[in-house]
Image (tube, helix red, strand yellow):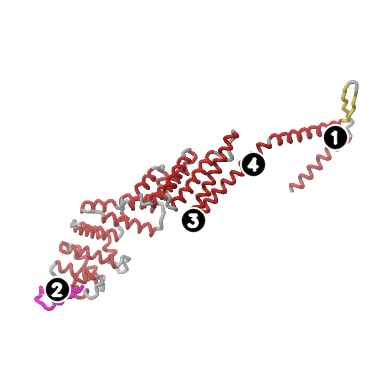
Amino acid sequence: MRAAFWLLTLFAIAVATALVAGNNQAVVTIFWPPHRIDVSFNLMVLLLAGFFLVLYVALRALSAVVSLPLAARAWRAQQKERAMYGALMDALAHQLAGRYIRAARSAQTALAQEASLAQTAALSGQAGGHSASRSSQLQALAHLLVAESAQSLQNRALRDKHLQLALQSTLPRHAQEVREGVQLRAARWALDDRDASAGLDWLAQLPQGAGRRTLALRLKLKAARQLRQTVQALETARLLAKHRAFSPAAAQSMVRGLALELLASAHDPAQLQQAWLSLDDSERDMPEVVVHAASRLSALHGDVALARTWLLRVWERAMQPQSDISDGLRIKLIGVLESGADSLDAAWLARIEAAQMGRPRDANVQYLAGMAFLSRQLWGKATQLLSQSVSSLQDAALQRNAWRALAVLAEQRDDPEAAAHAYKRAASL
């Protein structure tokens, strides 16, 4: 369609020219004393058009000849710039391929090309082939590649040298993003060297927004764990979970592990209660965290009633027929309740008895009920439940305690043979 329009336009121009010039009888007279020259108007128009065309071509040719040195200089600068970027790409490719010596050489070649390009531009008094922002970014990236290669080769002196050069190259405002990347890389290198304090110092130099990025939070979490700063590590893990840096299962596992570590670091009941209150509601609902907190409080000779209050969060869930709580955790829960069996109130005794009736074939629950009845001096029920559960218990500690309790019950009913047999079985475990 466009070609058809062009063809119609040409035909229109030709028709207009024929109409105007075909019957044009005008004459142009040029007086050049003592001469007189008569020329048709059409010829004069053609001569003038030809003159201006020749003049235009001559001016363009003269301009091309004058600008030839500048074009040659620009061509050489372009070749240097291409070589510079090619060397930088080679350095990156070698770095990814694990060829660290070649990567460092290629990056240094890129730096040499950039320096030559900048020197040429300075001598000519013209701007270089690339802007100042691109120049600073390229220098920083090249120095960073050399430092990364030196880190992989355990050459810390060369690494630190090019790290400082990379930071100096990112001083302008337009290189802020690259500077943040260099600082994050330096923090990671410090953590690889097991220098968590230096890693945190590098992270502290980041702007507030950059410090909350996922990569920065990952590095901060690793540094806090190396320094055993459990509180800071737990807060960082919560932020990472909120940012969905991990899968839900992995995030829950990490937070749970840090919460357990925080509770284990308490050395007295007051510290333990403070650590418990510092946890989120979702963390205090984790069965492993609840049972560990109660067990730790019992081990520190804290308030047993408070420990049982914490255990209420998971008791009903653990005693359900299709409970998702593991047998190991249920055994630990039973152990915590058993340690405070002497102070069990009527409400807890009713809960344990109801659980035993709801799970009549669960040896662990039978054992707990038997020990609870034993603490209340209900010898008959205690003997019945412990006798039924002792052979089915899988945990050696619970089985040993059950045999010892049966020995005590046998002594209560003046049965020395049964007591001796029970003591013997307990000793064998």
Crowd class of label 3 (few under 14; some 14 to 19; many from 20; radius 10 Å): few
Q: Nearer the N terminus, badge 3 or badge 2?
A: 3
Image coordinates for residue 344, horizontal then vertical, percent: 17, 62
In this orientation, which residue lies closer to the viewer: 302 or 59? Answer: 59
Q: Which element carries disc 1, helix, strand or loop?
A: helix
Q: Nearer the N terminus, badge 4 or badge 1?
A: 1
In the image, the segment drawn in magenta is 407-429
- Within the magenta stretch, is there residue 412? yes
Image coordinates for residue 422, horizontal then vertical, percent: 16, 75
The residue labelled by disc 3 is 98
Q: Answer whether labels 4 and 2 touch (C-beta < 8 Å).
A: no
The residue labelled by disc 1 is 20
The residue labelled by disc 2 is 407
Name the residue type under label 4. Trp
Q: Residue furthest top?
A: 33
Image coordinates for residue 92, horizontal then vertical, percent: 52, 51
- Within the magenta stretch, is there residue 220? no
Q: Nearer the N terminus, badge 4 or badge 2?
A: 4
Indicate the quadrant where residue 425 lies.
bottom left
The residue labelled by disc 4 is 75
Quarter occupied by the C terminus = bottom left
Relative to 153, 127 lies left or right:
right
Vertical side of 298 occupied by 394: above or below: below
Please tell me whether mark 1 or mark 3 is closer to you in this view: 3
Q: Is residue 381 visible?
A: no
Name the residue type under label 1. Val
Q: Main secondary structure of the magenta part?
A: helix
